[in-house]
Image: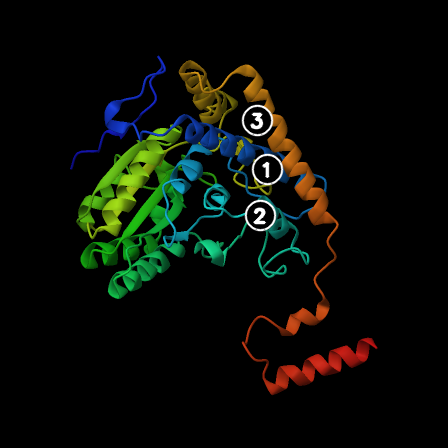
Amino acid sequence: MTDPVVISAIRTDGSVDPASDPGLTGPELLLLYEKMVLLRSLDEKGVALQRSGRIGFYIPSAGQEACPVGAGYALQEGDWIFPSYRDHGMALMRGSSLATLVAQLYGNSADATRGRQMPNHWCDRSISLVSVSSPVATQLPQAVGASYAAMLRGEPVAAIVSFGDGGTSTGEFHAGMNFAGVFRTPTVFFCENNRYAISVPVSRQTASTSLAVKAEAYGFPGIRVDGNDVLAVHKVVRDAMARARGGGGPALIEALTYRVGPHSTSDDPTLYRTEEEVAEWRKKDPILRFASFLKIRGVLNDALEAEATAVAREAVRQTVAAVEAAPPVPPESLFEDVYEEIPWNLAEQRAAFLSGRS
């Protein structure tokens, strides 16, 4: 088996490889840049909030912004999204509000899920974004099932499921890939290979020379893309989703990227990687790379770059202030959200609880 070539779009001279050019307009390019900056600003604030004790947990995506932003922009209404816990950028690109994401970090009354999930575990019914799950790769068979159901109903939609390189070391990865291959489900497996499954490097997870090559065993295409090139990511995901919607079956996309920060605010990455390695990847920062490209193309300049950063940080600041002002979830909500109609035994317990408060 031969490893797929790594697809890139942005060249150092400011041109774009025609084979990988998604053909976006100037306003679209600027939108992608602004969303990447917003995502970075949210990460900076999220880590600061946890470090200061204002939230309990946060999972940053710094260094990987091109993956969720580029992929998210390739999705259409009706497509199913089964994200990993580092892909809040997909939610932003599909229309989920910044307030929705921030409120979920706090789990107060502003949170749509009313604190039922731990931080960084978003969901949004309005955009068919299924709740993030903590166990690694459990979302893969779920995505395959949802896309299979859509296929049986004749719906022209596809499902994208995102996961890290660590997800490929699970049984769920192989079960999901095998079913998708056999039944030709409209599923796009989007692996963000950021080199580490928390502290375990890819070299200790597989003997394969790539992750994308694993798709051959299941009978569908495996594609490798430069995960720090937002245009290449967008083009590859857009093509794979269109192929899936059209009945062409599944695909596995391996996006080569790097997590420059910790796995989460509970992680100390200095224990398993060197500062020299991180410094090398910082030179490949997807936001700086895209900004340089946009400046060469005349879409961005220093003033617009500074303005985008200032606007993003202020939006995050205002959103955090508004969410923090929301009251806690009412204790009586403990008896809700499980049954459509509360059964008699829970109704009795709720009545006893409320009478004890009066």
Instruction: Let me know if residue 80 appears in the view.
Output: yes
Q: Residue 270: horizontal and vertical position, in percent? A: 55, 31
Q: Are marks 2 and 1 in contact (CB under 8 Å)?
A: yes
Q: Quadrant of the N terminus?
A: top left
Tell me the element at label 1.
helix
- In the shown orientation, is residue 161 left or right of residue 311? left
Tell me the residue at 40%/55% (across/down): 139
Q: Amino acid at mark 2?
A: Leu
Earlier-in-chain disc, 1 versus 3 = 1
Residue at the spot of label 3:
308
Earlier-in-chain disc, 2 versus 3 = 2
Local crowd at mark 1 within 10 Å, few (<14), some, or many (≥20)?
many
Q: Residue 288: horizontal and vertical position, in percent? A: 48, 21
Earlier-in-chain disc, 2 versus 1 = 1
Q: Are marks 1 and 3 in contact (CB under 8 Å)?
A: no
Q: Are marks 2 and 3 in contact (CB under 8 Å)?
A: no
Determine which of the numbered discs, if any, sits on residue 101 in the image: 2
Q: Amino acid at mark 3?
A: Ala
Location of residue 129 with respect to 352 vertically, above or below: above
Q: Nearer the viewer, residue 6 or 136?
A: 6
Determine which of the numbered discs, if any, sits on residue 254 in the image: none
Q: Nearer the viewer, residue 36 or 198?
A: 36
> What whole-number distance in Å separates the C-alpha atoms at marks 1 and 3?
13 Å
> Which quarter of the picture shows residue 228?
top left
Location of residue 135 with respect to 190 vertically, above or below: below
- In the shown orientation, is residue 141 left or right of residue 324? left
Residue at the spot of label 1:
42
Q: Residue 341: horizontal and vertical position, in percent? A: 56, 80
Location of residue 84 with respect to 151 vertically, above or below: above
